[in-house]
Amino acid sequence: MEQQKQIQALSDEYSGFQTELSTLVAARQKLESQQQENKSVQKEFSGLTDEANIYKLVGPVLLKQETSEAKSTVEGRLNYIETEIKRIEESIKGIQEKCENKKMEIIQIQSQMQQSTGQA
Amino acid sequence: MASGEKGGQIDLGSLSSQQLSQVKKQLDEEVEHLTNSYGNLRGAQHQFRQCISSIASGVAESTKGKPLLVPLTPSLYVPGELSDTEHVIVDIGTGFYVEKTTQDAVKFYNGKIEELGKNIKDLENIVNGKTNNLRVVEEVLRQKVLASSQGPQGGAQAS
C-alpha cells in the first residue's frame, strides 16, 4: 500500500513534467515559425536598394521606416529568437532528464513490488 | 514519428494487436496533421496566386482614371480613383510592408509560390510514405485480428 501511494505520487509528478514538456515544445515550435518568417523578411530586405520604401505596421497604420532601421529591427529579432530557442532547448533537455529519472524510479518501485508479491 | 518508422523496421508481426492499434492511432494522427498542413500550404499558395491576378486586373494601366469603390469596412465604401498604377505595397511578413513596382511584386509572389510548391512536394512525399506505413500496419493488424478470432491458439502461432 505504501508503495502504491508512492507510485501514485511519482506518476503524478511524471505527468506534470509531461505537460510542462509539451508546453515547452509548443513554445519552441512557435519560435521556430517566427524565426522562419523573420528570415524570409530579412532575405527580402537584403534584395532591396537603399531607396526602397519600407513601411511598418503599427496598429492600423503604416509608418514609413528607414531601410537600415528596419534591417536592424529584424536582425535584433532574429538574435532574440535564437537566444530564446537556445534557452527553451535547455529547459526541454532538463525536463526530459527529469522525466527519465522519474520513469526509472517508477520502474524500480514497480519491480520491487513485483518481487515482494512474488515472495509472498 | 520515430516509433512509426521503427514499427516498419521491426517485424510488425511481432507486435501484439494492442501495440499495433497504438501504432495505427499514432500514424493516423500524423497523417491527419500532415494533411491539414498540406491544405494550409495549398491555401496560402492560392492566396498568392490571387494577389498576382489582382495586380494584373486591378492595378493595370486600363484601370487608371476609372472610378472605384474602396472598402473602409466590409460594409462601408468610399469612391476613389487609382492614382498610381506602377507601385503596390506588399506585405512581406512580421508587419513589414515594402513598396514595389508591379513587376517586382509579381516576381515576389511567384517566388513565394515556388517556395510553397517545393514544400508542398516534400510534404506530399512524406504523406504518401506515412499512408503506406499506415496501410501496412492496418493489413498486419487485420490479419492478427482474423487469426485471433479463429482461436487463441491460432493467434499465438501467427505471432
Image (tube, coloured by chain):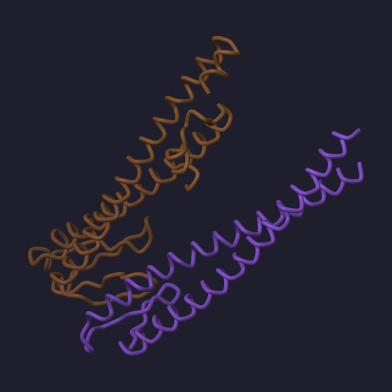
Query: Looking at the figure, which quarter contains the C terminus of chain A?
Result: top right
Q: Residue B134 versus residue B40: which sits nearer the camera? A: B134
Left or right position of A51 against B129: left
Residue A49 falls in image quadrant: bottom left
Q: Residue at x 56, y 15 (%)?
A: B148
- Asked if B133 appears above or below A87 in the picture, the reply is above
Which chain: brown?
B
* Picture coordinates of residue B127, whole percent (x, y): 35, 43
Say if B66 sits above or below B157 in the image: below
Q: Is residue A2 left or right of residue A111?
A: right
Along the line of sight, the residue nearer the viewer: B109 or A33: A33
Residue B101 position in % (x across, y down): 16, 74
Tell me where residue B139 sits by quadrant: top left
Q: Quadrant of residue A61?
A: bottom left
**Is B25 displayed left or right of B34 in the figure?**
right
Any idea which chain is the purple one in this picture? A
Question: Most extreme residue toward the left, as rendered?
Answer: B62
Quadrant location, the N terminus of chain A: top right
Spot the residue most to the top: B150
Q: Position of residue B61 (x, y in %)?
A: 8, 67
Q: Which residue reaches farthest front?
A: A119
**Residue drawn at (59%, 71%) of the image:** A90
Question: As displayed, is residue B118 above or below residue A89?
Answer: above
